[in-house]
Amino acid sequence: MSTKVGSEVLFEKVGNAGVITLNRPKALNALNLTMIRHIYPQLKKWVKDSETDLVIIKGAGEKAFCAGGDIRAVSEAGKAGDSLTQDLFREEYILNNTIGTYQKPYVALIDGITMGGGVGLSVHGRFRVATEKTLFAMPETGIGLFPDVGGGYFLPRLQGKLGLFLALTGFRLKGRDVQRVGVATHFLQSDKIVSLEKDLVDLKTPSNSDVAQLLDSYQEQVSCSRKTSTDGVCIHVCVCRTDHILLLFYCFRLFSAGSVEEIMENLKKDGSAFALKQTETLAKMSPTSLKLTFRQIQEGARMSLQEVLVMEYRLSQACMRGHDFYEGVRAVLIDKHQSPKWKPSTLSGVSEQAIEECFSSLGERDLKL
């Protein structure tokens, strides 16, 4: 079973596995509403199908799993008063929740760029397999948004203050680091993906532990580099984790604060190359987005995935009503001059009342899961 050639998302039944291929390689497999409306019912169908034992999701082409959502289309819809600004976020978040609560093994092969909407399609699933080509980021504060698709759930559950750091700065994690921090569950070399997929579809009625065992066996092949000692005996030298530990240390020390303003003070006082770089990065982001995101991560740490998605839908609609999202898309994605004119332009100009209103209930229009 597969969809017609040329479809933006392909579905196949291979062995006992349902395989989803995001099929917009020229657009880096960016997720749009049409794709969401195909994936959601297919997942619902497979979870009830006794002949489908697991689901695999991957991206077509060499570059990306999924580089994000179709943000330009949402921006155009918002300007035109089109319902896409409600429909895409609502249906995407419902899909994220379906993945997060899926009752069969769900394996995302995040081999390549994985950002925004692509994170939502992968990170809530039971298994996420990164490779040396994986590039993970949640860069939404740079376009007047916030790290949505359940970012408020998984980011505060990363080690220390790493999730808050990633959320505010849009910092890019690459390769093995994506697995080290817990965004991916496993890491292997990209040339092993085809072999892994074959072994996955050959599993007979696998449990989550069966899938984990298979993935572990692949990861063990790359977890250490081999080196021959002077007496010819092959020994294992584990890959250095210094950079990862340093990143965690800096994040904890500098991003442990009660507000975005305090974080900026910490960074300025520290004065290290790392701190100066983050100060420079944060200065480019939407001040409103930074404050929304700080509160989102704080609140999300105490919430279930479902509660987070309801909160994030409220935030998404607040961004659709505001100024910075449209300005960010124009400056970063359309004109590409990377110099958006944010309103307000400073952190001090963003009132607590304005942020509070973004978190307010939408009443009948709230997301229902």
Image: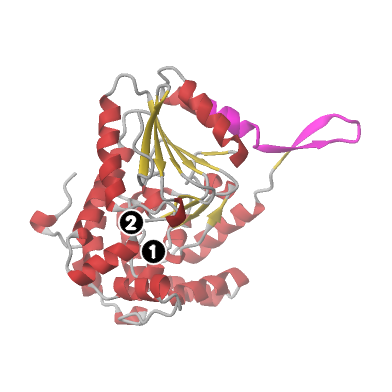
* Element type where label 1 sits in the image: helix
Give whichever of 182, 302 is nearer the camera: 182
Q: Which residue is mark 1?
A: 140
Give whichever of 43, 136 is nearer the camera: 43
**Mark 1 vs 2: CB contact within 8 A:** yes
Q: Residue furthest left?
A: 364
Mark 1 vs mark 2, CA separation in Å: 8 Å
User: Looking at numbered disc 2 in the image, what kind of residue is underneath it?
Assistant: Asp
Q: Residues within 10 Å of mark 1 (few under 14, many from 20)?
A: many
Going from the N terminus, do you reach mark 1 or mark 2 first? 1
The colour scheme is secondary structure
Residue 342 appears in the picture as rendered: yes
* Element type where label 2 sits in the image: loop
For the C terminus, the image quarter is: top left
Q: Which residue is mark 2?
A: 148
| Quadrant in which residue 88 is drawn | bottom left
The percent coordinates of residue 324 (x first, y second) are 31, 74
Please give left or right for residue 105 compared with residue 349 in the image: right
Give whichever of 162, 310 is nearer the camera: 310
Q: Residue furthest top?
A: 204
* Residue 343 on the magenta segment: no
Q: Which residues are magenta?
A: 214-236
Please give left or right for residue 347 compared with residue 175 in the image: left
* Residue 220 on the magenta segment: yes
User: Looking at numbered disc 1 in the image, what kind of residue is underneath it?
Assistant: Glu
Give whichever of 150, 87 is nearer the camera: 87
